[in-house]
Image (tube, helix red, strand yellow):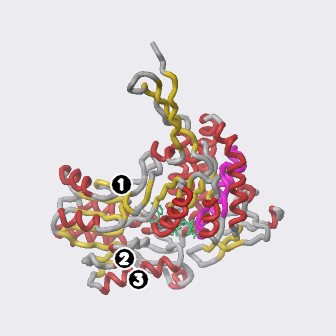
Amino acid sequence: MTELSERPRVSPRLVGSLPTGFLAATWQQPAEGRTFGVTDPATGEVVAQVADCDPQDAMTALDAACAVAPSWTRTSPRHRADVLHRVYSLMHERREHLAGLITLEVGKTLTEARGEVDYAADYVRWYAEEAVRPAGRSTTAPNGEYQILTVAEPVGPCLLITPWNVPLAMATRKAAPALAAGCTAVLKPSELTPLSSIAFAQLVLDAGAPPGALTLVTTVSAGPLCAQVMADERLRKVSFTGSTAVGRTLLSHAGARVLRTSMELGGNAPFIVFDDADLEVAVEQAVIAKMRLGGQSCVAANRFLVQDGIAGRFATALGERLAAYRLGPGDADGVGLGPLVDDRAVDKATRLRDDALARGATLVAQAQMPEPQVASRGSYFAPVVLDLVPPDAAITHEEVFAPVAAITRFRTEDEAVALANDTEHGLVSYLFTQDLTRASRVTGLLQSGMVGINRGLVSDVAAPFGGIKQSGLGREGGPEGITEYQQLKYVAAPGLRT
Ligand code: NAP
């Protein structure tokens, strides 16, 4: 085993080093000391080397999760709640450190990164509170001869796979309900953003969770590593957040083992603005729905569907707001928007923007790129507003995952609903109108797991987050989120005769 001092460390730039011993939280030491680099998207610099685990290392992590599972499952719900409350407190104590890591690995501004830490910690607090409220019911059988009892048991060892865009919050949205329910877990973050997950895994240990309750594997070989773990019959559940394409692959592995899954997949959110909407509110909320995480969010507004009578004013006002963004490194003063996560993201956004323009869309406004010495080093993309985007443009069918606001105009309510539902995805829809009857009618017709009415932000730890159609299966957050890590046992028990 390599000495801690010889192990890969995170760059002290910006955030200082990770807590001493952070690698002890993980199965981060492959036998040959393989590592991979983590790149800061603001500068293109490799800022840390972390362990590159192979499938065998992942099996060691699963062994640890399975070894501790029986004792963790038998702890009292109050004990698990207490551990999670300590995790919550430590996340706030280490807020600046965690936020710094998120900015370093994802590129988002420090303000947004701090917001992510708070949001991530709130999931931990919510599930600390849910831990002591296990589901279950009891009733008398219809023939009156016995009792029907249901007991919620932990499903067992889980594999948690998270994306790069909200790395800490996606980790807590899975790990907190899993631990609260009495499950143990192996967490696999994206190779682009392992740093905040490493710090989180250490923090869970520091809060008193036993080694193995949450282990971490970082790797550049997600496919073979996850396939091997999922083939092991000791694994009882996989919870995945990421693209629909990878979700489909994982569902086929899961099908072979009839493994329980939660799938939080891609989106293609319509943001519908009717003529009678409050323009100021619609624009304000459009900025939130489009620009949160620089557009790199599964619930980002991907298609602005705007009624003819208000479309011109909406486009102009949104253009003014997006053009005003100042781009630069996420930790620099006065910067409102950091880089995208990597150059591939920039290439995709450029392709989708140019395709829309080639098909007849008009450019309403575009922000300035940062000065050349900054822009040439990082993965920057200037926010842009496009109007008159035709429904056949690629951007209306692909997740752009960047600050491109694509406006398509419509005339009638029926047309708006048809356009909104014309996608394989069904994660979230937003609609803006001051007519309550219309709001409820259209909400009922929209094919999505979540709807925001006159709101561009629906995420809340107390709400069931999730999609329909090819946006996924299952829900995270709210009381529903913990049931994803529980299985019901029905007990037919002797009746209580009075
Ligand atoms: P992704 O490419 O699907 O990756 C997600 C995770 O899966 C990463 O940890 C990735 O590891 C891993 N992975 C990749 N190939 C795999 C395989 N064959 N087997 C097992 N794991 C594999 O998605 P992403 O680019 O990170 O994230 C963006 C996507 O996530 C978008 O589509 C977005 O809409 C979606 N998302 C959905 C939600 C939601 O709640 N519905 C929330 C956030 C994001 P590597 O990165 O190391 O390859």
Q: Residue at x 35, y 78 (%)?
A: 394
Relative side of 253 to 274, left or right: right
In space, the residues marked 3 and 2 are separated at their CA atoms by 13 Å
Please give the label number shown on residue 384: 2
Height in image: 254 above or below 106? above
Q: Alpha-carbon neighbours of circle 2 within 10 Å: few (<14), some, or many (≥20)? A: many
Q: Quadrant of residue 387?
A: bottom left
Q: Quadrant of the N terminus?
A: bottom right
Residue 224 in the image: state x and y as whole percent: 63, 69
Where is mark 1, residue-wise? 450
Please give the label number shown on residue 351: 3
Q: Alpha-carbon neighbours of circle 3 within 10 Å: few (<14), some, or many (≥20)? A: some
Q: Is residue 291 magenta-colored?
A: no
Amino acid type of the residue that numbered disc 2 sits on in the rendered structure: Val
Please give the label number shown on residue 307: none
Secondary structure at badge 2 equals strand
Q: Is residue 210 magenta-colored?
A: yes
**In this view of the protein, which residue sits in the foreground, 182 or 87?**
182
Height in image: 384 above or below 116? below
**In this view of the protein, which residue sits in the foreground, 450 or 253?**
253
Q: Residue at x 31, y 84 (%)?
A: 357
In space, the residues marked 1 and 2 are separated at their CA atoms by 26 Å
Residue 137 in the image: state x and y as whole percent: 46, 31
Residue 294 in the image: state x and y as whole percent: 45, 68
Secondary structure at badge 3 equals helix
Amino acid type of the residue that numbered disc 1 sits on in the rendered structure: Met
Q: Quadrant of the C terminus?
A: top left
Give, as a single range, the part of the protein colored magenta.
188-217
On whether ligand 1 comes within 8 Å of the CB at mark 1, the answer is no
Upstream in the sequence, badge 1 or badge 2? Answer: 2
